[in-house]
Image (cartoon, grey):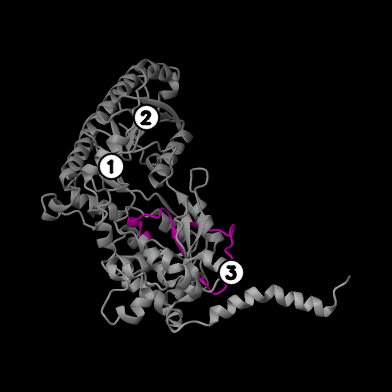
Amino acid sequence: MTDSPLRTLARRVRSRLPGLAARARATVRSPDDALVADAMDPDWYRAMNPDVAASGADPADHFLRHGWREGRDPVPGFSVRDYLELYPDVAAAGINPFLHWLKAGKAEGRLPRRDVGRTARAAALLEPLKVRLDRAAARWPRVRPASRDDLVRRLAALGPALADLHLTVSHDDAFRHVGGLQLCVQREHAAFAAQGVSGLHLYPVDTWPTLREDGGGPVGVSLAGEAWGAWTAQDVGAALAETLPAAGRRTFALHSLLGHDPAAVEKVLHAGGFAKGVFWLHDFASLCAGVHLMRDDLVDCGAPPAASAACGVCLYGPRRALHADAHRRLIEAFGLEVLAPSQVALDLWRRASGMTEVPARVLPLAALGEVTDALTPPSSEGVLRVAFPGAPVPHKGWDVFRDLVERFAGDPRYAFVQFGAQGAGYAGMAFVEARVSAAAPNAMRDALVREGVDVALAWSLCAETFGFTALEAAAAGAAVLTGPDSGNIAAQVASGLPGRVFADEAALFAAFETGEVLSLSRSARGAEVRDLVFSGLTASPGVRPGP
């Protein structure tokens, strides 16, 4: 029997009653609930809680019924967890902490959140260097080195192919791991291979936070990017001495000695007949065990004299002399030329090391090339797209970016995006995968262009020797936002790279609050996409070391 129009209408009304009742309950609130709802920032709450936004739930209702019990915050300036930890009486009473603060806590002078500052919070997580070293020792793989005869056999089989050989040393297997230094080693080997020079790479079989003094453990060996295995440093030197042709050119580049015993590296180089080479300033491990020159990993230290009181209280102080002296011995023993990716890095190193007579030059890792129309960014639709490119780690400014997101995630003027190999999973921002490799050197630039990024935060807290992500952002047409302590990033922006050097974080946040930063949008600047021109590093013309 066919339903009449009246029956159909009645059935539709009945089906909608539960939803209508729920909405009615949501809009009829007690005075306490109304107080909380009026004080909340619904747009920010949705931005910080994508699951709530996706469900269509009313932000105030969700917070009142579930959110505060789950530790979700109602506004940027109030922390549910902090308030309950600071005031056990509120936690014991089982009261909604935001409601308590609004009704009584604010008038009583109670804090809405811990206000100790980012540096103090980071300081609470500090570990003594000995703890880090003990952990590395416990983690260090129990690798049994292969026999020297095996390495001799494999090298001998290559015969004349090893007449011209370039050896690199770094802190890990640069052909298996991804990172700025690793890509530099890969590009260097590729450039030498194009010249008919074989490439040998030595690395510790696992990471270690400082130099070593115990021989360094097994040394990983790879040739032409292929991992061969691990041997003792003594056996590597002996095998090279036995098999390398008498004639030929042998050069080397020290990219990082972390995890190595410099004395063992020196013996390998002498045994293999590597008389001349270069040392790269990718970081400042040659000055201190704190490779970023950040006192206790918290603030830029500026590399004061080793005998200073500042070094005496820093967790890296006791091992600073080890790093400085060991690098000095190697540089002087081989007459190494020091290659710095920027003038900022070289000037700092010369001042702090005192090695003013050592031959050195600046060789940028890359530069902006010609304008290209191969990629076209999408329309911004009136929203400033703000990016954080690269690894989400504190010394690169990740915490500053998170604070920006927390404060402005609900602001319709801005959209925040993290770019990198892996998302950090932080609410209020999108994530776009961008994996730079030797096969895809422009992956970061291209991802930034595809997403139409207007500005990129490169707020390094340490003196960057180069700052590759800033250059990638500029190549994508984005303006670089940075601070005064970012080393070569600030220097590049001051010298004409699109962007702004802010005096401090307060100035950065003020630019977002007032909307001043909107003047850096792509459309306002007429931004252009450019190619990146990469250096061949040690294989660059006029740089290749040798007798």
Query: Is 391 in the magenta?
Result: yes
* Numbered disc 1: secondary structure: loop
Pointer 2 and pointer 1: residues touching (CB < 8 Å)? no
Report the quarter where the N terminus lies. Answer: bottom right
Quarter of the rendering containing residue 497: bottom left
* Numbered disc 3: secondary structure: loop
Residue 369, relative to residue 228: is it above or below?
Answer: below
Q: Residues within 10 Å of mark 1 (few under 14, many from 20)?
A: some
Report the Cα–Cα distance between label 2 and label 3: 49 Å
Residue 46 spot, x, y in % from top left: 50, 70
Q: Residues within 10 Å of mark 3 (few under 14, many from 20)?
A: few
Residue 509 spot, x, y in % from top left: 36, 73
The segment highlighted magenta reads 369-398
Q: Name the residue carrying label 3.
A: 379
Pointer 3 and pointer 1: residues touching (CB < 8 Å)? no
Q: Is residue 258 visible?
A: no
Query: Is 129 in the magenta?
Result: no
Q: Name the residue carrying label 2.
A: 220
Q: Name the residue carrying label 1.
A: 209
- How many marks on residues? 3
